[in-house]
Image (cartoon, rainbow, N blue to C red):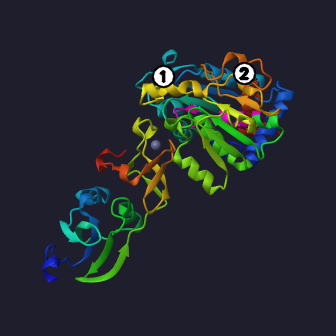
Amino acid sequence: MQNKSLVSITDYSKAEYLKILDLAAEFEKNPNQEILKGKLVATLFFEPSTRTRLSFETAINRLGGRVIGFADVNSSSVTKGESLKDTIKMVTSYADLIVIRHPTEGAARYASEIATVPVINAGDGANQHPTQTLLDLYSIQKTQKTLENLNMFMIGDLKYGRTVHSLLMAMSYFNPTFYFISPDELKMPREYLIYLNQQKIKYYEYKEFMPIISEADIVYMTRVQKERFSDPIEYEKTKNAYVLRNSMLEHTRANMKILHPLPRVNEISLDVDENPKAYYFTQALNGVFVRQAIISSILGLNS
Amino acid sequence: MKDKQLIVSAIKNGTVIDHVPAKNLFKVITILNLDSIDTQITFGTNLESKKLGSKAIIKISDKYFLDEEINRIALVAPQAKLNIIRDYEVIEKRVVEVPDSIIGIVKCVNPMCITNQEEVKTKFSVISKDEVSLKCYYCEKITHQDQMTIYNVNSQY
Ligand SMILES: [Zn+2]
């Protein structure tokens, strides 16, 4: 994967995922390794995402590399008139690697065509956010000691949530059983169900999770946003059905862990935070190790 | 039978494209760039067709197409048949075939796609050939046959 851009979760093979996860585990044991000394990484955030940017910049700093870039378009000289193409053409001559976040779908793929250095997609609109998916995989593997044969619960907005779509694609290498729990309006899109059928992966669709949550190994929560509903009354009726509370975790499996891409609003109530099954804050911290692993693999620095 | 054939006069040398759905005649003209050809072109449209309901036929004198050129019309005229004419004789018949990838021609259905926001030429992989559906190389969204908008030649980058 040296010099290969990471734009979409489908750019990597199963073997490449596993290599990244192994490497991330090494970085977790020994986070400060100055293998990026003398290298410059550009972090171009055309839309603000403090969480993702800090995670990337921490990863780069722990590797001893340096960062140039901007945190959002308003604070940079990239004015509305300058095309993405021109910005990338400029930056590609300075940096050894480009990390890009952009509100437009496909922007990272396009940047990777223009850039002469590898590009990492840190989110392109509703499309892809592959480093999030890899940190989700890492968190699953770390808590379950395996990625194989798990019962994966995905709860909430399964229609628009890009993280659940990418995670579905990535997990499908590992023979999971999926449980999709969502209101009718926000069901997993048909194209993904067709994909699972083709891959002969089992899945079930439900509207409520309480009767079945005892089966879960991983519960992946997403936010149900009001603006996704065509009918506001429908939202009011359903919003509380997709909130996880501590009392609901009583009969869940001992190994069960709750993940969430963060930031959360109210879909996980605060009383869950103290439960050892709540893993979402650690999950976010894992992002730094996973990004260290991705950056060092792409720059060919791990030997 | 004879009457029908006379609707569009015969050509001596060139290409006849038959079984074009009447509603897509002008899309075919656009895709093949026929408005920039200076040899004689005749066409008939709203002709009866058992298969298509209403079809069009295009006759282009002294012009032959490469497979890759002609396959571009598969998106709008998948059942089109080509007759290659020399000296008033049909010397070869060809059918169009949906290619594996499409560059340009079609607009991505996703308004948030980079190809609809900046001057980026569209690129698709063809994921289904019967009911044509295209997967955008950039935003990864699917554009289905019934959602396809064909670019005007001049608005392509
Ligand atoms: Zn697109």
Residue segment shown in magenta = A123-139
Quarter holding residue A53: top right
Estimate the x, y position of residue B154 in percent, counting from the top left.
29, 47
Quarter of the image that includes the N terminus of chain B? bottom left
Sequence-first disc among 1 and 2: 1
Can I make out residue A5 in this image?
Answer: no
Residue B70 sits above or below residue A162 on the image = below
Q: Chain of mark 2?
A: A
Callout 1, which amino acid? Answer: Val
Q: Residue at x 77, y 47 (%)?
A: A149
> Regarding mark 1 in the picture, which secondary structure is present there?
loop
Q: CA distance from mark 1 to mark 2?
A: 46 Å
Judge from the rendering whether residue A227 lies leftward or rightward of residue A170; answer left or right: left
Report which residue position mark 1 lands on.
A78
How many residues crowd around disc 1 within 10 Å: few (fewer than 14), some, or many (20 or more)?
some
Q: Is residue A129 magenta?
A: yes
- Residue at position x 66%, y 19% in the image: A269
Question: How busy is the neighbourhood of tag 2: few (under 14 within 10 Å), some, or many (20 plus)?
Answer: some
Q: Return the residue at label 2.
A: A246
Q: Position of residue A26 (x, y in %)?
A: 85, 33
Closer to the camera in the image, A101 or A274: A274
Q: Are marks 1 and 2 on the same chain?
A: yes
* Relative to B112, A131 lies left or right: right
The answer to whether residue B156 is above or below residue A301 is below
Q: Chain of mark 1?
A: A
Q: In this image, A149 relative to A97: left or right?
A: right
- Indicate the position of residue B107 as horizontal and vertical percent values: 38, 46
